[in-house]
Image (tube, rainbow, N blue to C red):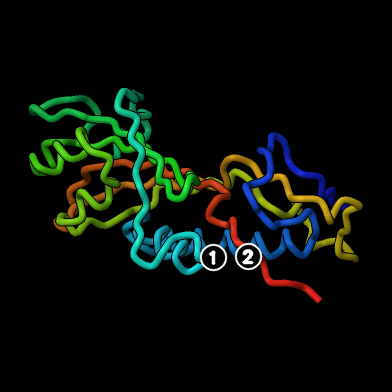
Amino acid sequence: MPDLAPPQPATEPLLCHPWRNSFMHRLMLATLISQMENRLLAENSATQTLEHWLREHALLGAHETLRAEREASAHSPCPSDLLAALDLTTPQGGQSLRYRKIRLAGHNRIYSEAENWFVPERLTKTMTEALEQTDTPFGRVVSPLRFTRQLIRRETLWSPLPDLWETQPHLPNSATEADPLALPPHLFRHIALLRTHAGTPFSLVVETYTPQAFAFPPPALR
């Protein structure tokens, strides 16, 4: 019988989060995570897609947008296997590589963390200045490029359901199903390459999503 004990490590329960350690709530949460991830994979702008999701689930007002919190002093080298995707294996031809790290937040909740490596020479000066001097989300800054998004890798960091639960003859139960479900700090991660409308690669993005996008009440069960 699969074990429904919370995975480790786990955070404290979300503020006012209603999910319980029951099979039905875990099944609902697994479905919702899949739905949200599929939307993100189908669209070019992760920020806009996330905002739409949050508005639909009353976590963001109809005219509200997410706030980007930039780490001004953040620095990290681009992994060599990803660097090749930018056609910039070594800095040459006057082109360089910049790094940016932000958290997308709203109403005291962090919904995602994003790292960007971008080639400033492939952007306009105005875009580069906005990325280096403001907290505006990356996708919003470069939207005039009409960019496309190519998924390089996706990673599942946590699943509400135990492995092979569907092969069991009976649905698993838990003695603690009335307890709050402990959720990890991150659920899944997307690594993608952004290209201009003309096809030129200009940025690599690593986006890691938190459980805060699911801090809404599940349907009541009779």
The residue under label 1 is 35
Give x and y (percent) for residue 68.
Answer: 34, 43
Give the number of callouts. 2
Question: In this rendering, would 98 be left or right of 10?
Answer: left
Give x and y (percent) for residue 140.
Answer: 24, 52
Extreme-bottom residue of the structure:
222
Asked where in the image residue 119 lies, by quadrant, the reply is: top left
Q: Give me the C-alpha separation between circle 1 and circle 2.
A: 6 Å
Q: Secondary structure at mark 1?
A: helix
**Amino acid beneath label 2:** Thr
The residue under label 2 is 31
Contact flag, marks 1 and 2 (Cβ < 8 Å)? yes
Residue nearest the viewer, comparing 140 with 68: 68
Measured along the vertical axis of the image, is residue 208 above or below residue 172? above
**Amino acid beneath label 1:** Gln
Residue nearest the viewer, comparing 90 with 193: 193
